[in-house]
């Protein structure tokens, strides 16, 4: 399970050091894709395969399902750790997530998310104003 929040930076070549705790669970090779809220989602291969199976079951006749599948898979890249524990993020993913210098890398149960520091701070500021609403919605879902 991925948990925690870490501050990191991206170098001029687009390389990011992943936290050691996350590297252990991700393994040597894993998938990075466009996430929601303009962050990147990082999945270990087994979790990626589970997600792929779920997405395969969506009806191709549904326009929204096709759009999401395209968004998710076209934006995906297999990444591999180098000897320093870094990954090279493709330029299209860096652009999508507005990754420039400072990053926040968070654990979210079955995946890791990579955010620009500015986007993460903005997201948290907006979320703080809405905690009561979020709690009510979670209660409706039985959580």
Image: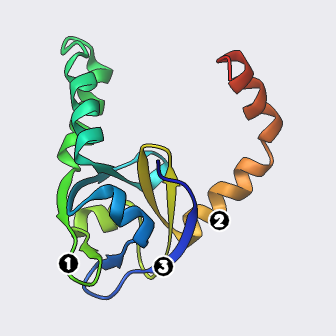
Q: Is residue 81 above or below residue 39?
A: below
Q: Residue at x 29, y 77 (%)?
A: 85
Residue 1 horizontal/vertical position (percent): 47, 47
Given residues 75 and 24, the one toward you in this image is 24
Q: Is residue 32 left or right of residue 129?
A: left
Location of mark 2 (residue): 121
Q: Is residue 76 above or below residue 94?
A: above
Q: Is residue 64 above or below residue 8?
A: above
Location of mark 3 (residue): 8
Q: Residue at x 22, y 16 (%)?
A: 57
Residue 140 horizontal/vertical position (percent): 70, 16
Residue 83 horizontal/vertical position (percent): 21, 82
Secondary structure under tag 1 reads loop
Location of mark 1 (residue): 82
Where, quadrant-wise, is the C terminus in this rendering?
top right
> In 3D space, how far apart are the residues under numbered discs 2 and 1 (Cα atoms)?
29 Å
Among the 4 quarters of the image, the one containing residue 15: bottom left
Q: Sequence order check: which comes first, mark 3 or mark 2?
A: 3
Among the 4 quarters of the image, the one containing residue 97: bottom left
Q: Residue at x 28, y 79 (%)?
A: 14
> In 3D space, how far apart are the residues under numbered discs 3 and 1 (Cα atoms)?
16 Å
Given residues 109 and 76, the one toward you in this image is 109
Q: Sequence order check: which comes first, mark 2 or mark 1?
A: 1
């Amino acid at each position: 399970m991925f948990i925690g929040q870490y501050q990191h930076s991206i170098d001029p070549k687009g390389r990011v050091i992943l936290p050691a705790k996350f590297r252990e669970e991700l393994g040597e090779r894993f998938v990075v894709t466009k996430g929601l809220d303009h962050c990147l989602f990082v999945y270990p291969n087994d979790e990626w395969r589970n997600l792929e199976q779920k997405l395969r079951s969506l009806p191709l006749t549904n326009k929204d399902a096709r759009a999401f599948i395209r968004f998710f898979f076209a934006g995906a890249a297999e990444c591999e750790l180098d000897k320093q524990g870094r990954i090279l993020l493709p330029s299209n993913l860096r652009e999508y997530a507005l990754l420039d210098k400072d990053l926040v890398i968070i654990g979210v149960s079955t995946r890791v998310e990579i955010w620009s520091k500015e986007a993460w701070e903005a997201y948290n500021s907006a979320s703080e104003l809405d905690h009561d609403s979020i709690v009510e919605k979670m209660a409706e879902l039985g959580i």
